[in-house]
Amino acid sequence: MQIAILLYDRFTALDAIGPYEILGRLPGAEVVFVAERTGVHHTDNGSLGLVADATPSDVTAPDILVVPGGPGQTALMADGPLHDWIRAVDAGTTWTTSVCTGSLVLAAAGLLKGRRATCHWLALDQLPALGAEPTGERVVFDGKYVTAAGVSSGIDMGLALAGRIAGDLVAQTIQLGIEYDPQPPYDAGAPEKAPAEVVAVLRDNSRFVLAGERWRDGAVAEK
């Protein structure tokens, strides 16, 4: 079972690593990091790099495709060779998935037309223009297409998908193995739960947040 995880410059680390940690532990799994060029691709903050060992021409029939999000996603929205590859491998995948704004890439490639999908809550309003039906759910299954909301939800997506592929026992064993037992100190992980002032700060600074840039209290004046 080959799992292809797309890399590109300025992707968000956990978008790729979350599903990797889960799906890569499935029995018989082979994970390949693929990008338009081989070598190191740095994350949105520039301090971490992951290596792509394969290009699209090397990966022609993955069972699972994972497209992470991140500010570099903007450069992947125009139709071209990468979209051609995504559409070509999608024709044979068992599951085509995304995390965060990775769903915008899938939608731009024409794969989510008329389908329910999610992404980071700050970018949900971009899905309708690309033909998808946005939903604020954390993980959305629509046929073989699985989209996850922002960043950390890729772990949940991986577990939900692992359960469908290998059964609840395997998925729960993976969960216990990585000790995924979230107990955050704050209940502010969704706009419906976070204090209004926190939501306002994120909305006002959405350019900085979605671009992966560091921002401070004064960033509102700079937007």
Image: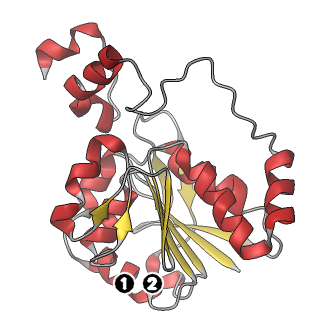
- Residue 6 drawn at (x, y percent): 48, 64
Q: Position of residue 137 (x, y in %)?
A: 45, 52
Instruction: Give the label on residue 76, or none.
Output: none
**What amino acid is found at the position of numbered circle 1 in the picture?**
Arg
Q: Residue furthest front?
A: 192
Q: Which residue is mark 1?
A: 87
Residue in view at x 13 percent, y 17 percent: 222
Element under disc 1: helix
Q: Which residue is mark 2?
A: 90
- Nearest the viewer among 200 and 20 is 200
Q: CA distance from mark 2 to mark 1?
A: 5 Å
Crowd band around label 2 with a 10 angstrom C-alpha radius: few (<14), some (14–19), many (20+): many
Residues tagged 2 and 1 counted as in contact (Cβ below 8 A): yes
Q: Which element type, helix, strand or loop, lies under badge 2?
A: helix
Q: Nearer the viewer, residue 191 or 74?
A: 191
Residue 214 left/right relative to 193: left
- Residue 96 vs 126, above or below: the answer is below
